[in-house]
Amino acid sequence: MFLQVEKNASPYTVQSYMDDLEDFNLFLIQENISNLKDVDYRTIRVYLTRLYEKKLGRRSVSRKISSLKSFYRYMEQNDLVADNPFIYISLPKAAKPIPGFLYTEELEKLFEINDLDDPIGQRNQALIETLYATGIRVSECQRMEIKDIDFSISTMFIRGKGNKERYVPFGRFAEVALEMYINNGRRKLREKSPAATNAIFLNARGGPLTARGMRLILNKMVEKAALTVHVHPHKLRHTFATHMLNEGADLRTVQELLGHENLSSTQIYTHVTKDRLRHVYMNSHPRAKSDFFLKRGDESDN
């Protein structure tokens, strides 16, 4: 209840906390420890050993310790324990892998394969343009309704994780694709179902498109475009963030657009593509430019 009301945690997060606490409780039973007040530094070290014996990854272990640290913080604040034994435990964070993203040439192939005379093609075009233009999550895209789009200022109202709300702008390509789909393709799809819905993206039967349906659509588009890379909605989110940062957007702005609560979540996108790396190098390093040697030659002649 505390997590749901005070922390506004999602059901998934609450379930993860419950699983972590249940795992720790089973460990305490095995160690014949019946009181949470009796847990000390030594107990925790033994628990960590048990977790590593199970071959759990560093990230999984860190999540469990984080859950227990929060649990004991709550217990301490409510005078249920004298102190929090987990504050003395620090775990090295696992290195975050560089997120996969698409290059411009790969994106162009996806943008060119849809039949814009067909309602389904118009929907698919609007979907991929929206995901790339805004970087929103597939769950956020699936929840969007007609009233959430303001074409007068090219902005979308997004309901994110934990019911957090934000406004995200979109560009001309997404605007054209969305207007075509909403005014034409969506109307035709809507006629196929007697049930009322305000969802923007509809399936072939006229009902709201599910997140799973969106993923299947992308898979079919990739297959049709003959791309060898795996594309999922989150990869378009990665691509959005990578391209924004590579083109000079500041980290705080991208954080706001993505709906990240912590800046550290956005920093994983600060990797630099090979093309961008070469461009910056060739334009910044004195001895990388051919005219550097020309100037040296001119100076030696004088």
Image (cartoon, rainbow, N blue to C red):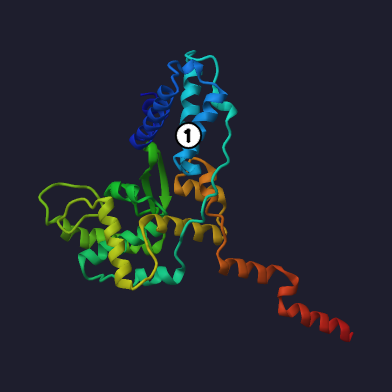
Q: Residue at x 27, y 59 (%)?
A: 216
Label 1: element kind:
helix
Q: Is residue 133 visible?
A: no
The front one of 5 and 186 is: 5
Q: Is residue 174 above or below residue 112?
A: above
Residue farthest to the bottom, as pictured: 301
Q: Residue at x 51, y 51 (%)?
A: 254
Would you say 81 lies left or right of 155 here?
right
Q: Position of residue 15 (x, y in %)?
A: 35, 33
Q: Position of residue 277 (x, y in %)?
A: 61, 66
Q: Which residue is mark 1?
A: 50
Q: Position of residue 64 (x, y in %)?
A: 46, 34
Q: Is residue 42 visible?
A: yes
Q: Residue at x 38, y 42 (%)?
A: 160
> Is the C terminus in the top left, top right, bottom left or bottom right quadrant?
bottom right
Q: Quadrant of residue 300?
A: bottom right
Q: Residue at x 51, y 20 (%)?
A: 39
> Is the N terminus in the top left, top right, bottom left or bottom right quadrant?
top left
Kind of residue indicated by mark 1: Arg
Residue farthest to the right, as pictured: 302
